[in-house]
Image (cartoon, rainbow, N blue to C red):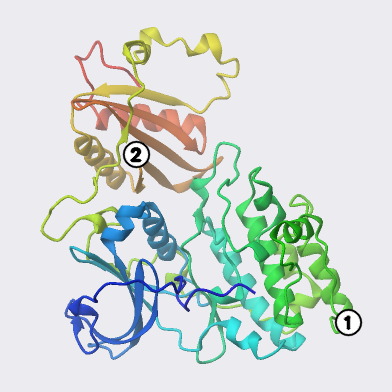
Amino acid sequence: MHKGKNVYGHDTTSTSGSSCNVEKKGTVLMHRYEMGRMLGQGTFAKVYHGRDIVSGQSVAIKIIDKEKVLRVGLVEQIKREISVMRLVRHPNVVRLHEVMASKTKIYFVMEYVKGGELFNKILKGKLKEDEGRRYFQQLIGAIDFCHSRGVYHRDLKPENLLLDENGNLKVSDFGLSALVECRRKDGLLHTTCGTPAYVAPEVISKKGYDGAKSDIWSCGVVLFVLIAGYLPFHDSNLMEMYRKISKADFKCPFWFSPDLRRLLCRILDPSPSTRITITKIMDNSWFKKGYKQVELLPKDTTEDPGIRTSIGDVDSIFFSSDNKKVESPTPIKQTSTMNAFDIISLLPGFDLSGLFEMDAVEKKAESRFMTQKPASAIVSKLEELAQNESFRVKKRDGLVTLEGNREGKKGRLSIDAEIFEVTPCLYMVEVKQSAGDALEYQRFCSQDLKPSLAGTWQGDHQQRPSL
């Protein structure tokens, strides 16, 4: 089995360099937390035990080196991890209590899970079927909740499953997770990631995969390991192991019950189209034996507003405390491939797309406009509109997404606004519907979006591109 991360999901490769004073045992971080012993150390982060000086509660504090993260391009991964942990508030998922930042560091204050990794328990020997079933039930309950929130873990394995003092399972390490909006136009994820022995065949094939179905496969491998004490697919030759995974070439040991064997064969199905779903797993007779569904508190059913973020929003954690710019706060995409013809073609009277796009009726509604207003002004207008209309705002690498809070005929309306820098003083903004009903989108644009952004477009009233 793979080993190489500490209990909070960081590789244990040691790094050189002196520790910041704030990391010394006994010091108080941000006037809130007393620092304790180090729990683990990785390439970009260190994890410490901490104590809330007000409540006395034990916490785990992950300290990330901002400069190193920026240097190797892991900004989006850190942002995504924060966003994901805000979404998945579940009793069987490690909790994020607070996010803070200084000029050089990012601090994750998390639930302290002192029982260690489930991996360590397996090292002592295989589990009895009833015990393995209980952990599997908690794992499936947690992953089902994650999927309902549009989150795919993508690195499920015993090393990322922790145990609390009562022996309850806690899913950790969302560093490789993906949100539903990370899918491409084909509705699939395409990033190959995870731990080789636990990844689904379709992930290895690099043809795109459903995040929920690949997570189910990984849960099946975890279940096998818990009760067998070894991996279902293992070979010293990586290509041979991949061959076994692609064919689901495994054998259950003799001590597996017939019902468990049947369930595993349905989970470890190499075809994602016929692989069992979580709903059917939870309806399986073997799974249901002794199952106790976790009761979610009201704050577990939605994003918890109680998470304190001392630095405002996710983007702003990459700003230094003295306001020195580290990374642009406004999501802008640079474009150096746009020529004069491209710019002219964006104007309404010169749109030639209908000559080339036979399926124009089916295409998601979209509009573009040019402006000399700074990108920050555009984003501010969008945020102001979102607040007035009770929309949620998400920002990432050149994209601002407005998400409605009402369920329409085809789900919740979602609108993407992409900002491109054409020249240092000219921007192009592309607005398009990414989810929901097209008529609802058009109505929103005409009644809300266009009036709100009036005056932002380049040109006078007659020349202004219309939504």
Q: Which mark is residue 8?
A: none
Q: Is residue 171 above or below residue 368?
A: below
Q: Which mark is residue 398?
A: 2
Q: In this view, does 89 lie above or below 401?
A: below
Crowd class of label 2 (few under 14; some 14 to 19; many from 20; radius 10 Å):
some
Which corner quadrant of the image does residue 253 belong to? Answer: bottom right
Q: Measuring 67% from the left and 62% from the top, which residue is drawn there?
A: 216
Crowd class of label 1 (few under 14; some 14 to 19; many from 20; radius 10 Å):
few
* Residue 197 falls left or right of residue 143: right
Whether residue 334 is visible: yes
Which of label 1 and label 2 is nearer to you?
Answer: 1
The answer to which of 222 and 356 lies nearer the viewer is: 222
- Disc 1 to disc 2, C-alpha distance: 54 Å
Q: Where is residue 322 in the image (x, y as percent from the top left)?
A: 10, 58
* Residue 253 falls left or right of residue 406: right
**Amino acid at circle 1:** Phe
Q: Is residue 379 above or below residue 322?
A: above
Q: Position of residue 245 (x, y in %)?
A: 75, 59
Figure quadrant of the C terminus: top left
Residues marked 1 and 2 touching at CB (< 8 Å): no
SS at circle 1: loop
**Amino acid at circle 2:** Gly
Reading the image, the residue beneath label 1 is: 254
Q: Where is residue 227 in the image (x, y as percent from the top left)?
A: 74, 82
Q: Measuring 65% from the left and 57% from the top, which residue is drawn there?
A: 214
SS at circle 2: loop
The answer to which of 23 and 306 lies nearer the viewer is: 23
Which corner quadrant of the image does residue 367 belong to? Answer: top left
Q: Earlier in the sequence, mark 1 or mark 2?
A: 1
